[in-house]
Image (spheres, helix red, strand yellow):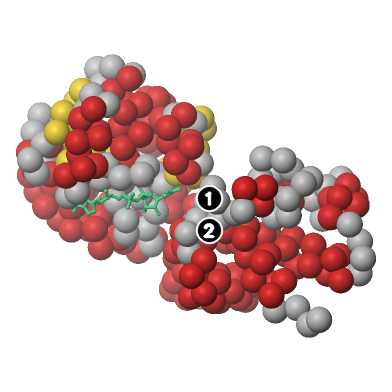
Amino acid sequence: MTVVAFIGLGNMGGPMAANLVKAGHEVRGFDLVAENLKRAEANGVMAAASAADAIEGAACIITMLPAGKHVLSVYEELSKKADVGTLFIDSSTIDVQSARKAHELAEASGHLSIDAPVSGGVGGAEAGTLTFMAGGTTDAFGKAEPLLQPMAGKIVHCGDAGAGQAAKICNNMILGISMIGVGEAFVLAEKLGLSHQALFDVASTSSGQCWSLTTYCPVPGPVPNSPANRDYKPGFAASLMLKDLRLAQQAAQEAGAATPLGAEAAQLYSLFEALGNGGKDFSGIIEFLRGKTNR
Ligand code: NAD
């Protein structure tokens, strides 16, 4: 049993903390939103009055927050207040630079630190089947791995500080681009009089095969449980895809990498969101592409 402080008990953090409780850990939680704290309490999390209160006696601090600025402000406070040698795990999806800064803050005060963003969404957080992509020292990763286990289906040590965030945004850049590619192919097929099922039957076993087609098909029918079959109810919301594509663009600019298709995907999702579709599943981008088609 480990005493874990969990900061950020929203859509993801709430069920993740609940799975740590189920695994027998003592979880002390804090969130700025009282309702989220109450929901976590109902799942066995001990509600703290502040982040500083939550970390008292904790051997590990997990953060699951919206963006880099939230993570850095929490790390600035808690790295000074935590007992020396505390393990800091940040599972939020944030920019690589902020992730590296968070590592520096923790390590400068004598703590262990890993960035460990996740994929798998709210469903994976509830089921305890998230994929964790971790960055940090072997020592820190070794200590973090057993604590991540009750929340995880898969845990990958990707490299040094920031490598987990790098893996997350590179993966999601592939996903954003491939979903647009698959959407474009279906829109062209419609114009050419080719049925959705015929394109699926050929491409799903040919060189066009990819996850966006075979698991998450953006038209209803071929993959019965994809969001296209429930009017693009998420799933993975377009606004979260846009967030990750923007993080990828920021990283590409800072690192000097050419990512023209990533830039175009960010632009298309930004237009899709501006039309009021941010809450739809990201595979709904096909409707936007269809809307741009010449009659
Ligand atoms: P969310 O907005 O539901 O939860 C974030 C929580 O952090 C909120 O409850 C908010 O009140 C709390 N918070 C903000 N600042 C705080 C502070 N200083 N102290 C304490 N609590 C604070 O977001 P979410 O969907 O749970 O996502 C969290 C992170 O996980 C994000 O970085 C997101 O990009 C990433 N992520 C989300 C999904 C998903 O499907 N929702 C999937 C993978 C990764």
Residue found 52% across the figure and 74% down from its top: 275
Q: Position of residue 28 (x, y in %)?
A: 17, 31
The span from disc 1 to disc 2 (Cα, nearest Å) is 6 Å
Quarter where residue 271 is shown: bottom right
Q: How many marks?
A: 2
Residue 198: mark in rendering:
none
Q: For the residue marked with disc 2, what is the amino acid?
A: Lys
Q: Residues within 10 Å of mark 1 (few under 14, many from 20)?
A: some
Mark 2 Cα within 10 Å, few/some/many (few <14, many 20+)?
Answer: many
Q: Answer whether residue 165 is visible to the viewer in this image.
A: yes
**Looking at the image, do the residues carrying marks 1 and 2 touch, with CB atoms under 8 Å apart?**
yes
Element on which disc 1 rests: loop
Q: Is residue 20 positioned above or below 238 on the image?
A: above
The residue type indicated by label 1 comes to Pro
Residue 247 lies, with reference to residue 19, above or below; the image says below
Q: Position of residue 206 (x, y in %)?
A: 88, 50
Residue at 54% from the left image edge and 47% from the top image edge = 235
- Tag 1 residue: 234
Classify 100 as above or below 121.
below
Identify which residue is drawn at 21% across, 43% down.
Answer: 35
Indicate yes or no: mark 1 CB to ligand 1 under 8 Å.
Answer: yes
- Residue shown at 91%/69% (left/top)? 192
Per the image, the residue denoted by label 2 is: 280
Q: Can you name the residue that lies furthest to the bottom here? A: 294
Let me know if residue 111 appears in the view: no
Assign the C terminus to one quadrant of the image.
Answer: bottom right
142 sits to left or right of 280: left
Q: Earlier in the sequence, mark 1 or mark 2?
A: 1
